[in-house]
Image: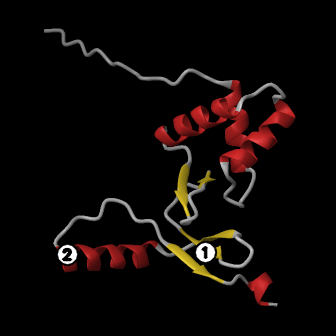
Amino acid sequence: MIITIDLVIFMTKYSHQREIIYNILSGVKTHPTAQWIYDESRKSIPNISLGTVYRNLTKLKNDNRITSFSIGNGTEHFDADTSVHAHFCCNKCGSISDVMLQGSKVEKLEDEVNHSFGCTVENTRLLFYGICKDCNR
């Protein structure tokens, strides 16, 4: 008896523009906006359009290569670090910094929410707001 298995592999077509956008984003820790990424992309690809940048950022998000979030001002910020972590947003200068939390702390918060509300947390995003150390000086 011969058993055959057909595998269908969904591959994303390689895009030079997408890789440049990803490399720009992964090279910074500032959580830039699409406009900033567009401005940086034009240094390597002068004729790239803002729409192309948005389409590639969406594709990178859908492929789980990057994440995005808003700090409440209507502007989306992008992050190439897809690990579980929080962000600190300065109310004075607008800077955004990574806050690395031990996984067990996040899990305890999720467990408390699950227990309190009888729900199942599938994703957690933590944003802290305040005044950063540079602005506090």
The three-letter code of the residue at mark 1 reads: Phe
Q: 55 or 126, which is in the foreground?
A: 55
- Secondary structure of residue under mark 2: helix
| Location of residue 107 with respect to 13 vertically, above or below | below
Numbered label attached to residue 117: 2
| Location of residue 15 with respect to 84 vertically, above or below | above
Q: Quadrant of residue 110?
A: bottom left
Q: Quadrant of residue 46?
A: top right
User: Seen in the image, is 61 located left or right of residue 113?
Assistant: right
Q: 8 or 130, which is in the foreground?
A: 130
Query: Picture coordinates of residue 10 (x, y %)?
Result: 42, 23
The three-letter code of the residue at mark 2 reads: Phe
User: Seen in the image, is 130 located left or right of residue 3?
Assistant: right
Looking at this rendering, what residue extends furthest in the bottom direction?
A: 137
**Quarter of the figure that contains the C terminus:** bottom right
Query: Picture coordinates of residue 132 (x, y %)?
Result: 71, 82
Looking at this rendering, what residue extends furthest in the left direction?
A: 1
At x 52%, y 25%, the residue is 12
| Location of residue 119 with respect to 6 vertically, above or below | below
Q: Earlier in the sequence, mark 1 or mark 2?
A: 1
- Secondary structure of residue under mark 1: strand
In the picture of the structure, the residue carrying the numbered disc 1 is 88
Q: Quadrant of residue 29?
A: bottom right
At x 56%, y 47%, the residue is 66
Q: 84 or 61, which is in the foreground?
A: 61
